[in-house]
Amino acid sequence: MKRISETLALQNVFAPQSVDASTDKTSNYVDLSGVEEAVFLISTAALGSGKSLTVKLMAASDSSGSDAEEIGSAKFTDAEGTAPQLAAVSYRVSALHGRYAAVTFQHDGAAAVVCGVTVAANTLYVPVNDWVLVV
């Protein structure tokens, strides 16, 4: 059985850096051809109680994102205000959208906070007629 680090392809698409409040930031676009589903993990320092992180999932036909379209969005609220936060945005890849995807995000914290984005995708191929047990 493979370990999770051997099953998932992981890529850093937005290196951790200080992000000012109310400033849109976009991760790098990642090629999702041959991938069934991917998850973008947006990590932030504590935003402050009641402050939020708005995330938009973007799809494009090229790695520069020149023709990107928003295909979903969500707003996450920091209930504690004192702990780092992690927002997970899952995307089941669709032929209706471009093969490249990224996230655009912004927070409304009182000050700049450090943010980073990692994408993970399961690249394990399992034949249709194979018997598989996943525990």
Image (cartoon, grey):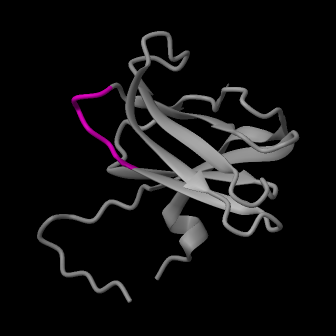
Q: Is residue 135 above or below residue 50?
A: below
Residue 92 belongs to the span the image colors magenta: yes
- Using residue 54 as the reference point, say whether residue 84 is left or right of it: right
- Residue 58 in percent (x, y) is at 45, 30
Residue 119 belongs to the span the image colors magenta: no
> Which span of residues is magenta-colored?
91-97
Nearer to the camera, 119 or 126 = 119
Point 67% across, 66% down: residue: 79
Q: Is residue 58 above or below residue 124?
A: above
Q: Quadrant of the C terminus?
A: bottom left
Residue 130 picture quarter: bottom left
Q: Is residue 86 above or below residue 11?
A: below
- Using residue 22 as the reference point, say whether residue 62 is left or right of it: left
- For the stretch drawn in magenta, the main secondary structure is loop
Please identify the residue farthest to the front as the structure is shown. Answer: 50
- Residue 126 in percent (x, y) is at 27, 65
- Residue 103 in percent (x, y) is at 55, 36
Residue 12 picture quarter: top right
Nearer to the camera, 77 or 17 = 77
- Residue 120 in percent (x, y) is at 54, 54
User: How many badges with numbers are in the image?
Assistant: 0
